[in-house]
Image (cartoon, helix red, strand yellow):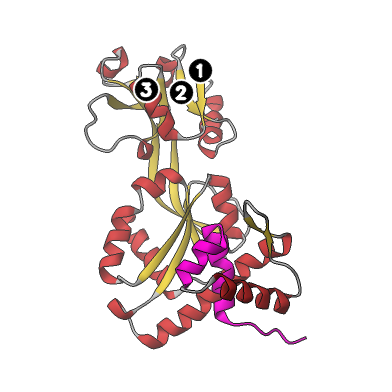
Amino acid sequence: MRINFELLDLRAFLAVLDLGGFHKAAEQLNLSQPALSRRIQSLEAAVGAALLERTTRRVAATSVGRSFEPLARRMLTEFESSLMSLTGVGDRQTGQVTLACVPTAAFYFLPRVIERFNAQFPNIRFRILDLSANEAVESVARGETEFGINFTGSSHPDLRFTPLVDDPFVLACRTDHPLARRRKLSWKDLEGQPLIGVARNSGNRQLLDAALLKAKVSLNFFYEVNHLTTSLGLVERGLGLSVLPKLATPQGDHPIIVTKPIGDPVIKRTIGIVERRAGRLSPAGQRFRDMLAESWSS
């Protein structure tokens, strides 16, 4: 069987998935919608199966399409990498870095490194998937992203974890709360307090619960939220106290919220780079990964 399709067919397929529909994808690729549809049909004919399901409300990948997506991304990345090695470096270098990142790291961890990277390589694009810890690990393992920034993944047999920085859990409370005046806090000081925590199935909560169980500390999580930023809104209203990683707290002075370190014991997560053991990063991905490691290990 002869596989016959063009790179633009792959770009068309991925654009429809990334943008959620044919109209936006056609605009991005500067194609008419009929031309975009022909590209998709050509790719489906080459693969021998439907890749997209079209309804009046949405466009989604079929089961074959979901399996084909990481392969398509790798093929494009490898092609762009080969071109990059021929077309030079610096402000002439093009390409895309695709990574999976837990939301708190995406918000506080990445921007300063991306800013520095873009100053050297202004034509390299970024595709950042801000996912839960478990989803981000699987995205890297499946090859959908080149690498990830996470606090889990060290035990995955197919992945390598490179530590970058420790991120301790701290207390966030209003400035007028009695605990805000304390210089030192232990976990025992929080027993009986109405606490705000993330959902039990989240990576942060599982890490925290395991450490508290080991320390024989029982806390009263009166509120549960899906996103750490939501907990800060509840703290501002005086509804409770939040226990969350320091990277998820307001950076710098805040008019209402103050953060306090918690000891006895210090509970922390380690943020690091997660990548496939057998994988090979694109030149752009390798440069950004190295800059990331340099920035956060210094």
Q: Mark 2 near mark 1, Cβ–Cβ under 8 Å? A: yes
Vertical placement of residue 41 versus 256, above or below: below
219 vs 1, nearest the viewer: 1
Residue type for callout 3: Val
Residue 161 on image: x %, y %: 50, 55
Residue 74 on image: x %, y %: 56, 72
Q: Residue at x 39, y 67 (%)?
A: 125
5 vs 138, nearest the viewer: 5
Query: Gap in Å between the C-alphas at discs 1 and 3?
Result: 12 Å
Residue 235: give its label: 3
Q: In the image, which residues are magenta?
A: 1-29
Per the picture, the main secondary structure of the magenta-coloured stretch is helix
Element on which disc 2 rests? strand
Residue type for callout 2: Ile
Crowding around mark 3 (Cα neighbors within 10 Å: few <14, some 14 to 19, many 20+) is some
Q: Residue at x 32, y 53 (%)?
A: 111
Task: Please report whichever mark, 2 or 1, sits nearer to the chain's N-terminal start.
Answer: 2
Q: Is residue 64 left or right of residue 131?
A: right
- The question of residue 182 being in magenta is answered with no
Please tell me how many numbered marks the rendered image carries: 3
Which residue does the numbered mark 1 point to in the structure image?
Answer: 222
Residue 196: give its label: 2
